[in-house]
Image (cartoon, helix red, strand yellow):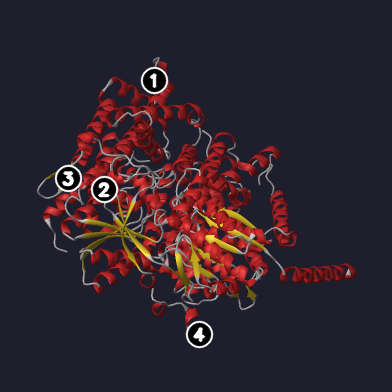
Amino acid sequence: MSINLQALSAQLLVGLINGSFYALLSLGLAVIFGMLNIINFAHGAVYMMGAFAAYFLLNIAGIGYWPALILAPLAVGLFGMVMERTMLKWIANLDHLYGLLLTFGLALIIQGVFQNYFGSSGLPYAIPDALKGGMNLGFMFLPIYRGWVVIFSLIVCIATWFLIERTRLGAYLRAATENPTLVRAFGINVPLMITLTYGLGVGLAALAGVLSAPINQVRPLMGADLIIVVFAVVVIGGMGSIMGSIITGFALGIIEGLTKYFYPEASNTVVFVLMVLVLLVKPSGLTGRAA
Amino acid sequence: MTTITENAVPSPRRTVKDEMVAFAIMTALLLVVPLTGVYPFFVMQALCFALLACAFNLLIGYGGLLSFGHAMFLGTAGYCTAHALKVWGLTPELGIIVGVVAAAALSVITGLIAIRRQGIYFAMITLALSQLLFFVYLQTPFTHGEDGIQGIPQGILFGLFNLSKPITLYYVILAGFLLGFLIIYRAINSPFGEVLKAIRENEPRAVSLGYKTDQYKLLAYILSGTLAGFAGALKVFVAQNASLTDVHWTMSGEIVLITLVGGLGTLFGPVVGAFVIIAMQQYLAGFGQWVTVIQGVIFVVCVLTFRRGVIGEIAHYFKRSL
Amino acid sequence: MRNTISTALLGTALSLAMAGIAMAQDKTVKIGSLSDQSGLYADLGGPGSTLAAQMAAEDSGLMAKGWKIDIISGDHQNKPDIGSNIARQWFDVDKVDTIVDVPNSGVALAVNNVVKEKNGVYINSGAATSDLTNAQCSPNTVHWTYDTYMLAHSTGQAMVKAGGDSWFFLTADYAFGAALERDTTEVIKANGGKVVGGVKHPLNTADFSSFLLQAQSSKAKVIGLANAGGDTTNSIKQAAEFGIAKGGQKLAALLLFITDVKAIGLETAQGLSFTETFYWDLNDKTREFSKKFAARMKNGAPPSMVQAGVYAGLIHYFKALEALGSNPHDGAKVVAKMKELPTDDPLFGQGKIEANGRKIHPGYLFEVKKPSESKAPWDFYKLAGTVPADQAFTPIEKSTCALLKK
């Protein structure tokens, strides 16, 4: 196959767009993992809930895309905090694998309930008027909405990084991860911080869901397969740093985009193959600390 | 910290006798099934899943490794056995061997990759590997994609047993299950099993004692994967088809659920769990759409309040190991 | 001990004899509607198919003539194992005579084998695989509504004739997608068109943008979607986003149901071409049935073509039973009768069942209406063309079914 530069750069850009979803999702996972030490298997389900929340806001309350961008993550984040308070909290002192199993069960429940009420084929959600249409970049036709997704998720990712790595709140958070007892001795409400962190991670996933609603059909199982890809992203990047998961997310989107161009049949498997390669060379992941 | 395998810590009053009695009761019950009018296909299905869960349990219960991708062994063996029977026209015993060897080979390859990490990472890696295999099987022609391999001839085992007769098939499947179960039992109670437990409890200590822990873990993984493959090969004769559902990650989740319900790290838990979950699927089919939700609820309830599982709770109550 | 055994044997012999007598005038029928009740196909089959089966029983007029018709339903959850288990148990324990619907090709083929083994009747409406009447055909099976060959031929032929003579395929990379692409390519070439390119995408792809970009730059007049379910709806939605239609390219979905159109919305789906064999708004008879049907559906939806196929298939099945005078509980015999009688039902009109089990009727090429043209909640389609019954399906001489080699 001759390499067409124009087409290649188009695929790179498209890959970057998908990468923003991976980045947002793996970022949320990393935030939760850092604080609660559990891998949130329900991440795909809350991503889906974000998209549904946007749909409900529009079709029941008449609230459009822009407010939904804030309201839906808030609502789903609140739901996440309730889950943390009522369930995850009780297994905090157990083997971390229980957290994985519990959130897996929660994912089944959430997806099952949505499937019962809304069927499988899904619901439509239109692109907001302000972002309709597209522009011709010369090498490709870029729908404006896709451009918006990349820029917006980059901003969110960097803001989250800043919040955790550069603010006082983030410092408490990181300290509480290292030594919760000591931080509690300083008079900081650690359980509350854990709850808020879980809410933040879940909110980030829901935000990704809202962003994807106009692109994909809003379906109950939209996050079910995605979560496994994000797991692979996390294994590749390692859970070592916030920035690590952001960069890995974007990078994998681009690699996947390139595969779609050169060998499309493998585009769903390339992430897993990469994971295998990384594990063989560097078992702790690209940015991870040794486990 | 409570580990996920607290069941497997033997109680001080652990006796081989308890296990023998329990094994005898289980075998006796299973032997008389065809006389009771219980639908035999249901029991055969449950037995295949029971063996599968026992194999999975060997890894989590005694190796401390939670695999979220065990469906890949079930499906790989299933496809290979099905292909061998249908396309190559092999006899049942050879077909089973083809399937088991394929699963063993797969477990060597994936094992070398997966045991590099532990805990949550191990779970995620096995999940990702099985998803990788799912896509491979979806695309390779010999699996016939979403149509699956259908109408597999059951054949005549050793030239003696006609497997298309339900009663013969039942006893062959039962024999296969008991064989697998005894292999696992033997492995757990061998020096190999003792070293595994030592690694699970304190890996650095085991390393300092001179054990090559990675090799032991890999060996446990291969044994587990191979036996899961054996379950997959047997299942082909019951279902007479091999399809993508057996390699999908939801199947891996089901295996975890079965073992969790029965009791992680107990000897008989996976068997009980398999009968509970398969019966649920069968008899709750009327609830149709709600089956996944019910499964999710069981997951949550088990993790929150019932972590020892059915057999684990019983064993704990009587202060025995089962 | 010996006594008890011989008594038991005598008892068995007696009850067998009684059963023999009862069989002679047996007018009981048990039908199992086996479908996906909650997953991908629940909306187009599912509870609606069970309702269609009930309505067929009511409308057959057999109950007034002393027949007893039982209908039960089951959920195969899109798993071939579960599907074949339910089927086997229905035959062994519940004494079911006939299984209907069964969407999902994998499950449909698994059930096909069980029905053959148990000598039941199998009226498949929901599955797409043309294997049911070719390599895996069975004397117990009637494949009613549609298949991949029909979809490919009808859509392909009609599009080429309407000027869409260069194609680019977006194909789901597994057996089903490959079959659709192969059959469509064949008909495109036969009608003088050409295929300028294609891309195989993995199943359950969330993002189609890079494939759509390739389709866009191929400058093909028609982009053929050889995929199904979520893949099709997502690719249609994203094609709208990338301005495919505005750039002058036409989208042809090779498998699309009315429920999918509902899910995508007319705004996005407008202008899309595809084939179905039934639409509720075809004629007075379909409208009359659909009105009754919708009134009894939970969400007021009209029947999909799959549900219509369940109804029509059973209507014909009951006719065959009536002609036989009683239920012989011999699937092959009933299916032979079904093939012998010409079919005539309100939904698919007049037709026949070929020796390989293929039900023959016309295919309709539809185009999705613009939102402004839609006057009622389910008013979605414009009829764009009809493929006559004798051209819609695999010609019988091309079928690889072993039943034909006698």
How many numbered circles does the render carry? 4
Relative depth, front residue between C24 and C2: C24
Task: Find out whether the residues at labels 3 and 2 contact each other: C-beta distance under 8 Å.
Answer: no
Relative depth, front residue between C328 and A132: C328
> Quick one: label 4, few (<14), some, or many (20+) residues within 10 Å?
few
Instruction: Give the mark toward the camera: 2 or 1.
Output: 2
Badge number at residue C238: 2
Q: Which residue is mark 1?
A: A183
Kind of residue sitting beneath label 3: Leu
Residue A28 position, x and y percent, is 34, 35
Q: Tell me the chain of label 3.
A: A
Q: Which residue is mark 3?
A: A142
Seen at 35% across and 72% down, the residue is C391
Kind of residue sitting beneath label 4: Lys
Residue B293 visible at all? yes
Secondary structure of residue under mark 2: helix
Task: Find out whether the residues at labels 4 and 2 contact each other: C-beta distance under 8 Å.
Answer: no
Identity of the residue furthest to the front in this view: C284
Are the numbered discs 4 and 2 placed on the same chain, yes or no?
Answer: yes
Identity of the residue furthest to the top in this view: A187
Q: Which residue is mark 4?
A: C406
Task: Find out whether the residues at labels 1 and 4 contact each other: C-beta distance under 8 Å.
Answer: no
In space, the residues marked 3 and 4 are separated at their CA atoms by 60 Å
* In the rendered image, the vertical position of residue C93 relative to residue A15, given as above or below: below
> Quick one: label 1, few (<14), some, or many (20+) residues within 10 Å?
some
Residue C330 position, x and y percent, is 63, 71
In space, the residues marked 3 and 1 are separated at their CA atoms by 48 Å
* In the rendered image, the vertical position of residue B127 relative to residue B240, given as above or below: above
